[in-house]
Image: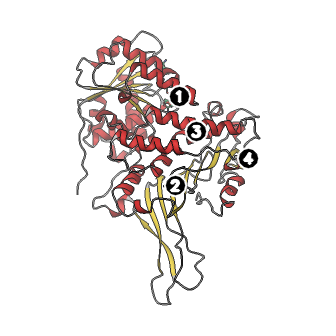
Amino acid sequence: MVSQVVPVEPFDLVVFGATGDLAQRKLIPALYHRLADGQMPDTARIIGVARTAIGREEFRAMASKALETHVAAADLTDDLRRRFLDCVDFVRLDVTGDEGWDALREALGRDENRVHAFYMSVAPRFFGSIALGIRKAGLAEGNVRIVVEKPLGHDLESAQALNRQLGKCFSETQIYRIDHYLGKETVQNLMALRFANTLFEPLWNAQYIDHVQITVAENVGIAGRGPYYDTIGAMRDMVQNHLLQLVCLTAMEPPAQFEPDAVRDEKLKVLKALEPLVDPAQVVRGQYRANGESGSYRQDAQNPDSHTESFIALKLGVSNWRWAGVPFYLRTGKRLRNRLSEIVVHFRKVPHSIFQGDHSHLHSNVLAIRLQPDEGITLSVTIKDPGPGGMRLTDTQLDMSFSSGLKRPVHRMPDAYERLVMDVIRGDQTLFMRGDEVEAAWRWSDRVIGGWQGQEAPHPYDAGSSGPEDALMLMHRDGRRWREIAT
Ligand code: NAD
């Protein structure tokens, strides 16, 4: 079996903010890999835009450096690098001004059948002027798409304002709101697992599932963007977007087709069914304190009195027939013991054990979908301990990771941006958030945030730990425990 790469049509991708971190660290390497795999044609063009005073050759040198830094040496050949850089162009333009747009129009050419994608890899305060600039320059006609990234607002009102602003210049079918978690292989595999097998879907409900845990743990702190992060916090930075998207994919009903609006309609229903968190005990906010060499959150934020959370754990419910009574426990934080993102589905225990002896060491079935590090899926099952000695039971893990079971080697796990940028070019919005989804997620999040305004400071936790004690209690009270964030 060979991997099937379907080439996309030639395209022009304009990257606003092309000298910035996201463009250099993610977008340029992602596009290089798509060229290397034969998906991006040599006639495609990547037009970097920034206000930095450089020309095409300097930008190409910058892109070349980005490849050296972010592409594995074994994957970077001189020939491919040259072919890739031949596709790269640069236009200097300050998006808040009027100059430079003519040069961008020149660089783009006039072929209206060619896909023109505009990636806004800049701070969101520029989204409006870029959208207007594109329209005023007459570049919004034809096969045009725009791509925006989080943060998509900081509350419902600002998200609505942003949607209105973009909506003035583009239709919803032209707007691609990226949540890169949705581009991860394992997240898509969750959908394959649920909807391409008969095995799981009949069990995927309150009758067989005890609870779901979603963890997005980071070991890094906020240093480098401290004062900015301090105005945001973990709820807005991570839960409102990434974690709620993972809840949606786990909890949604099967869509009629794997098709953009069918999938997004189902995700929206989940967001609308989220129970309001009225009980303050269902939310635990934390803030890391200094530990050994690691400084404290407040030092990193340069705010000695900060009440912003660098950690949050919450218990939420999805109010519908499928999920009634099944808690979803979410947690995310900075400076935790390790970097780990996973969705873990804990099935119920068997209703009655026919086996004699003490089986208290055994667990119920657990399906763990790991997004990072080492993307993969494992299912823990109970089996007979092999060999003589009576009917002894033991837990074992079925590894459903990509490399072990496939008949072809998986040389490299593609980064989420590779898939998502190619989806933009193909015009497939399935893995992108619709405007009403973003608003529904803010509507629920705003109420949670409103619930703690004026309340006590976040609970301190040691940098390098699993978070505050109270987050453990959130589960202990229910007779459950978090999966360990192993070192
Ligand atoms: P950055 O600060 O590193 O880069 C910003 C870019 O915008 C630079 O190229 C700069 O030259 C350009 N720029 C600034 N003002 C401009 C102007 N007036 N006209 C033209 N260009 C201008 O930012 P980043 O980390 O690359 O992030 C870009 C966007 O992506 C932000 O909205 C960020 O929140 C979002 N994002 C970034 C990441 C990431 O990993 N870096 C992840 C998710 C979302």
Give above or below for 297 relative to 59: below
- Residue at the outermost bottom position: 389
- The amino acid type, in three-letter code, at marker 1 is Ala
Q: Which residue is mark 4?
A: 460
Identify the secondary structure beneath mark 1.
Answer: helix
- Tell how many labels: 4
Taking the spot 61% from the left edge, 35% from the top edge, the residue there is: 446
- The amino acid type, in three-letter code, at marker 3 is Trp
Q: Which residue is mark 2?
A: 323
Q: CA distance from mark 1 to mark 3?
A: 13 Å
Q: Which residue is mark 3?
A: 444
Q: CA distance from mark 3 to mark 2?
A: 18 Å
Q: Are marks 2 and 4 in contact (CB under 8 Å)?
A: no
Mark before the other along the chain sequence, 2 or 4: 2
Q: Which residue is mark 1?
A: 159
Q: CA distance from mark 2 to mark 1?
A: 28 Å
Residue 356 sits in quarter: bottom right
- The amino acid type, in three-letter code, at marker 2 is Trp
Q: Residue 269: x percent and y percent?
A: 47, 43
Image depth: mark 4 or mark 3 in front: 3
Mark before the other along the chain sequence, 4 or 1: 1
Give above or below for 251 relative to 454: below
Q: For the residue with label 4, is its CB less than 8 Å from the closest atom of ligand 1?
A: no
Q: For the residue with label 1, is its CB less than 8 Å from the closest atom of ligand 1?
A: no
The answer to whether residue 400 is left or right of residue 485 is left
- Residue at the outermost top position: 98
Q: CA distance from mark 4 to mark 1?
A: 31 Å
Q: Is residue 290 visible?
A: no
